[in-house]
Each structure stands twice: as C-alpha cells, then as structure tokens.
Amino acid sequence: MSASPHVPVIAGAAQVVQRPGEQPLDAACGPIELMVAAARAAADDAGAPGLLARLGWIGVVPGWYRFNDPGALVAEQLGCAGAATALSAISGTAAQDLLGLACARIAAGDLDAALVVGGEARWTSTRLKQFGQTPAWRHDDTSSEPEHVSGFPNEMLAELSVLGSAAGAYALFEDRLRAAAGESPAAHTERIAALWAGFSAVAAANPYAWDRTAHSADEIGTPSPGNRLIAHPYTKAMVANNTVDMGSAVLLCSAEVARAAGVAADRLVFPQVVTHSHETWRVAERRELHQSPALAVAGRAAFAHAGVAPGDIEHVDLYACFPSIVQMSSAALGVGTDRPLTLTGGLGFAGAPIANAVGQALAAMVPRARAGGWALVHGNGGWATKQSFGIYRNSPPPAGFADVDVQADVDLAPRDVLPDDWSGDGTVEAATVLYDRDGPARLLATVLDDSGARAWASSTEPDVFRQATEHGLSGLPAKRGADGRLLL
C-alpha cells in the first residue's frame, strides 16, 4: 500500500545512556547534550542526517532540570533555530502526547518534520551536588516561551499530601488488586515479584537499560538492606527508578519528506492512532481503585481505529512504574500477563528520565515494528490518572492517522467522598504501610461507609502495621475518627 504524501511516519529513533564511571563527573553530559545526542542518533538511524535541518517543531518531555525552553536549546545545537518548540507537563503520557500532536499536524499538512525528545542527567547531577561541584554542562536558558501541553489540574496534585508519594498511591491500588483476587499478602507479593522478574530479564537484554542485571523473583520481593520496603508490598526493586542519565529521540516527518530526504522505505514506521483519556483527577473519587474505565475506553478506541485485536499485537510495552498499573492495563486491554509486556524492562530496571519512559519505549519499539507486526505503547501519568495508547506498524494506516481524545466516552461514575472530619463505622477497602529509611512510618487506608462513600484513614500503630502486612485489612470493619485515625 502506498502512503499519501502527508501521512506521518517515524523516520528514525534512538536512545542514549551515560553510564556511571564512563567519564569523570565534571565532564559528563547534561540533559540538553543527551537530547541532542539522541536526536543526531535518530537522524543517523533514519539514514538522513539532513532531516534535522528541516525540523519545524521540537517537543520536549520535561525532567528535573529548570530550563524555560529546552527545545530552543536543542534546536540551536541541531541547526534549526527557527523551529517551534513545545514542552509537556511531567507525565508518563508526555512523549506519546507530543508524538500524537506532531503526527496530527503533519497529517494536516501544517508541519513537515518534527522531533520528540527527552533526557535527564539526574544520576550525575545528584552526585555532583553531593561533592559540592557544579555541572560543566549547559546552564544558560532562553527567554523564548514554548507551547505548553498535557498538564494536570491542581486538584490532582492536592492529594499528594495524603498519598505521600506515587509509590503510596500505586501500593494502595495493589492491595485492592490483592483483595479482589482473594490472595494473602505473601502469595500476592510472590506473584508480582515473579511478574517483575520477567521485566528484569528484558532489561538485562536491553543495551540501553540502566540496570542490566537479571534479578530473581526472590531477590525482588524479599526486603534487604539494599532492597528496602518503600510502600507495602513494594520493595525498592518494584518502584520506578528515575535517577539515571538517559535520553531518547523520535524523528517524525511526512512520507513525502521522508522520500525526498532519501529515507529507505523499510526504515519507516507508521503511527496508526494515539488515544488519550483520564480518570477522576482525585483518587478518592475513583469508582474502583483497581480498575480504570479510562484505560479500557482508550484501549478499545485504539484497537478499533487501527482495525486490530489485542491478540494480534506482537510488540507490547505497558507502562511499568509499579506492578499495579501493569495488572490494571493488561486487564483493561484483555492482554494476559503470561506474555511479554515490556520492550525496555520497565521503569524499575530499564529506568527512565522522570517523565520519559514512553520516549524510551517508543525508541525501543521502532526496530521491532520495522521488522514486522503490530506494536502497542502505553503511557500512564499521575496516580493511574492519564492514559495514552499508541499503535504502530510498518505500513500506512488504512483509516489514516488519528490523534483522539476519547474522554467523552469514559463513564467515570465518581464515588462520593466523605468530609475530612467524618467519623463513624465503615469497612476497610484497601491499605498500605509507607516506609522511610528507619522502617514503617504510617499506614494509609481507604474506608467505605455503609453508602459506599470513601474516606482516607491512617494509623501509626505497630499492631495495625503487622496486621496489614501479614494478613491484610481489606474487608475488615473499622472506625474512623474525626482526625482521620483508623481504629480496628
């Protein structure tokens, strides 16, 4: 099938990794340098270095750095200083959000060539700070203002003070998954550690993974001095690692521009569709903690537009910051966890700059899709809040490319939330114990009253910690005090 002139294509993609010890700290590359290196590698991957001079738009996935317009700095280095720039919010959907936007503009004839990049040097910057050294990499900024895309409302961020961290939120979802499956805490931990061992094996074979050691399920699930508990049942090995020096780039253009630039036809990967959706912004309002209508709707819409079924997808990368989101997304898509679900190894083992895991996954997907078969990449942001799915193939999309917000089709059916000072009898829905370096710090739980309305609750009682981790609290009757304390 021949491609229409404006159909968007991925012409090239690349990843870069700067490993500890490869160079002195004071000579290490910073975020801009890593993104530039990835962009140049992506152009070489396309076999068309000259495409960089034709870039009309550069979308950047943000990191811990504080550049006002990192895209402008990247453009300057690449010789396309006139390119428009965009900066996404810090979200695990960011790279695919940017890719979908660029592809839509290419398909409309408004853009010839675009670049989606992300990168961070957090491992090096953290160590330089420890030694009181200043990074040698670029610090100067521009006064230009990029286009801002893919943000979150403040009401989502307001729950951070309750959840404590992303690990706390996803561990709470994990406990609800455990209770729904009727598993004991020990049996559930064993199961998800085995799931994560499979991800570790993929990372071990990934030349761009940060941790290329294959870890056993026992090593992953068993707490130890080097693998402390973060939020029960999550050990350090089960949580995302963003203390890395990595970057990625995806080079996009129209089929017409690719031909003119001399990109070989067998290098092209065709985005078929990108879908977007979101859950309730507040976790407390979710209908279910272990299910997501936003996930299900976005997945179904992606499959429907591409004209493909879940079982037809050969190359899958599900966002893997914590085990709970992989279980939720695989269930929503109808894809079993007994098959490979990652192309990189996930955020715990492959690692990723804070919001660029999908950027790394897209770059890993491209050579697979070139070789044949359908590919699917999932993005997840917030507390399983924002979702994106992209489907890719080495042939043009029969229905044309589509970048689709499917939120109007998502029936969130929000749950009632009880007042902060509510006190009364209820039932524990889910619970996790949050840890610091000294041990268990507090228990975080959700409680449902007789009407099904939800409230947050907490405890600092060692006996409650023990009961939650050894037996589980879900389904037990409890009282919640006006101060938020959980009383069993």
Image (cartoon, rainbow, N blue to C red):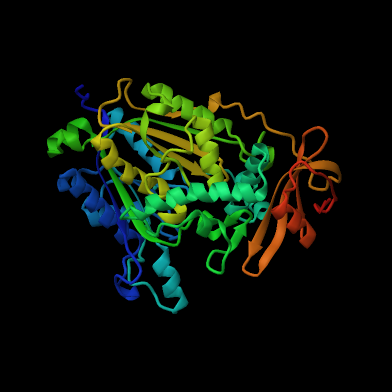
Asked where in the image residue 23 lies, by quadrant, the reply is bottom left
Q: Is residue 157 visible?
A: no
Q: Quadrant of residue 467?
A: bottom right
Does residue 49 appear left or right of residue 323 in this picture? Answer: left
| Residue 266 in view, yes or no | yes
Q: Is residue 413 left or right of residue 125?
A: right
Q: Position of residue 332 (x, y in %)?
A: 53, 31
Q: Residue drawn 66% across and 55% down?
A: 161
Position of the N terminus, as image quadrant, is top left
Residue 423 horizontal/vertical position (percent): 86, 46
Front residue (pair 281, 268): 268
Q: Residue at x 44, y 79 (%)?
A: 131
- From this view, report whether residue 386 is shown above or below residue 296: below
**Quarter of image, res 415:** top right
Residue 215, position as x, y percentages in the image: 45, 57
364 and 260: which is toward the camera: 364
Percent position of residue 70, x then y: 36, 55
Which residue does the image show at 81% across and 32% down from the upper left?
A: 451
